[in-house]
Structures are given as C-alpha cells and as structure tokens.
Amino acid sequence: MLVLRLLVCTFVAEFNCITNQKQKDMKKVLWLMAMVLPLMFAGCSSDSDGHDEQQSSIVGIWQETSPNENSFISLAQDGTFKLFASRNNKVGFMLDAGYYSQEGNTLKFQSVNGKNYDYTFTSNNDGSLSIPIDGNVYTFKTTGIENNAHTNPLIGRTFNCSEGGYMWVGGTDYGTIEFTNGYILKYTITTVKSKVTQKVTNETYNYLFMNDKLYIQQPLGYYICTYKLKNDVITITDADGRQVFK
C-alpha cells in the first residue's frame, strides 16, 4: 500500500503542474492515473473479502460426524462458545463455555472458568472441520447457527425436582434446581422433619444446553440428559432412564 500511496502522490504533483505543461505532459498524467486507480481498488477489495469469508466460515453449531458421538462445539455470531467433547467414556471428556476469537486457522478460547487455550483447526474439502482436542482429533459438520451460545429457555428459572418432595422414614427432602445462566446450575436440597427445616445443602454443577438435552458435569464424569417440565417441576433423566436430581 505504501507503493500505491507514493504513486498517488506522484499523480497529484503532476496534476498540479498540467496547466504549465504541454499536451504531451497531460497525456503522461492520464496514463499514470489509469495505471494507479485499478491497483488501488483491487488491493482494497482483496483484503476485505478474504477477511470476511474467513471469519464467517467458522461461525456455526458443529456436531461430531460419527453417529455414536455426542460431541459438539457452538461458535456463535457474538463471539460466545460452548464445547462438549467426549470419546464415549465418563472420564475423558471436556465441557466448557466462554468466549472465542479467530486468528487464521487458530481458535483462541477464554473460558468462563478463567482458563485460556488455543486449538488449530483444518477446513476439509467436504465443509467439515477437524480439531484436535486433548489428544483426540474430532471432525465436525455444521448443523445450524446461534446468535449467542449461552442462552437457553431454562435460564433464570427455578424448578422443584419432584412433586411433594422425596419422602424417607425420618422426613422429606425437597430438591430445587436453579438455572443461574447458560453454564451453571444450582441444586439445593432442603431436609424437613416434622415441618422444621433441618439442613440446607447447596451444590453447583457446570452444564450445557444443546438440542433440548442437558450436558451436566459431575465430579466423576458427566450425564447427557433429557428433561420434562410439568408446571413448576422438572424431571431430569439420564440415558438409562434414571432420575438425576430428586
């Protein structure tokens, strides 16, 4: 661009002098103008189009291509992301959310937990993306797009885990779940005996919402759950049909 600016300056200098030059000098100025302007427009157009295409191509909801995998990564339009990566075992998995940016073929992530990390992706000829995550290469295909990866219909709501609480011999446990935001839920158990509150226990879990499923991180693994709503009661069950929270 520096060379182009010098050429433009030369043109301007020539133009200011044309009134005192002969006809052949006028032709020289017109020739210089014809050479410079196409180069300027070509350079600006190339820079802009390449950048926009690169940024827009990465935005989307990317699902693992293998039919037996539940892994996904959502790179939303506003720079938020959510990620779940697993090789079908309860130990080796990753569940995270936060913010991302793109530098060439590198995705730079800033987790809501304060961790920063980078992944280098490969764009394949069939439109898929290959991303190495924690030693495993995942191949994703886009299935849609989100404006914000942290929003879902449960945020800001609190539900009971069962109607009337969970009864036991000595009393009743009342469980509630509050979906604080798009990646943290709060599970509260209130133990009541003879109508007197005996104990209140609070537990916090990381979770993600994708395709009407809840991906919930546990201390020793994770659950991929479905849920049902009935009035103010939510029933969350795992893949084996067991109720996760009571």
Image (cartoon, grey):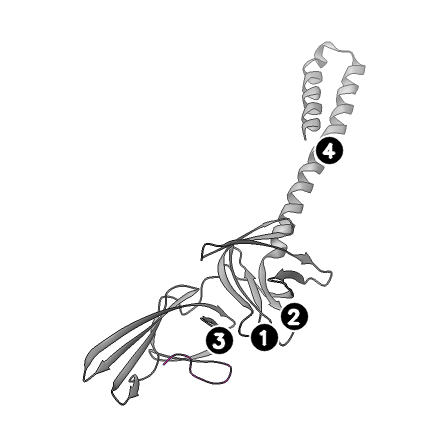
Q: Nearer the viewer, mark 2 or mark 1?
A: 1
State yes or no: discs 4 and 2 in contact (Cβ < 8 Å): no
Identify the residue shown where x is 72% and y is 14%: 18
Where residue 126 sits, quadrant-wise, is bottom right
Foreground: 233 or 14?
233
- Please say if the residues under marks 3 and 2 sit with CB atoms less than 8 Å apart: no
Query: Which labelled disc corresponds to residue 223?
Result: 3
Crowd around label 1: few <14 · some 14–19 · many ≥20 (10 Å): few
Amino acid carrying label 1: it is Asn
In space, the residues marked 3 and 2 are separated at their CA atoms by 20 Å
Residue 69, visible in the rendered structure:
yes
Magenta-colored span: 238-246
Q: Is residue 103 above or below residue 88?
A: above
Where disc 1 sits, the SS reads: loop
**Magenta: predominant secondary structure element?**
loop
Disc on res. 88: 1
What residue is rendered at 47% in x and 85% in y? 241
Which numbered marker is on residue 39? 4
Residue at the extreme right of the image, as rendered: 24
Between disc 3 and disc 2, the foreground one is: 3
The image position of residue 77, as x and y in percent, is 53, 56
Under tag 2, what secondary structure? loop
Please identify, in this view, whether the residue under mark 4 or under mark 2 is nearer the observer.
2
3D distance between C-alphas at marks 4 and 2 = 44 Å
Instruction: Work out whether residue 77 or residue 70 is closer to the camera in this orientation and state it.
Output: 70
Looking at the figure, which quarter contains the N terminus?
A: top right
Q: Marks 3/4: CA distance?
A: 58 Å
Which amino acid is tagged 3?
Tyr
Q: Residues within 10 Å of mark 2 (few under 14, many from 20)?
A: some
* Residue, disc 2: 65
Q: Residues within 10 Å of mark 3 (few under 14, many from 20)?
A: some
Quadrant (top left, top right, bottom left, bottom right) of the C terminus? bottom left
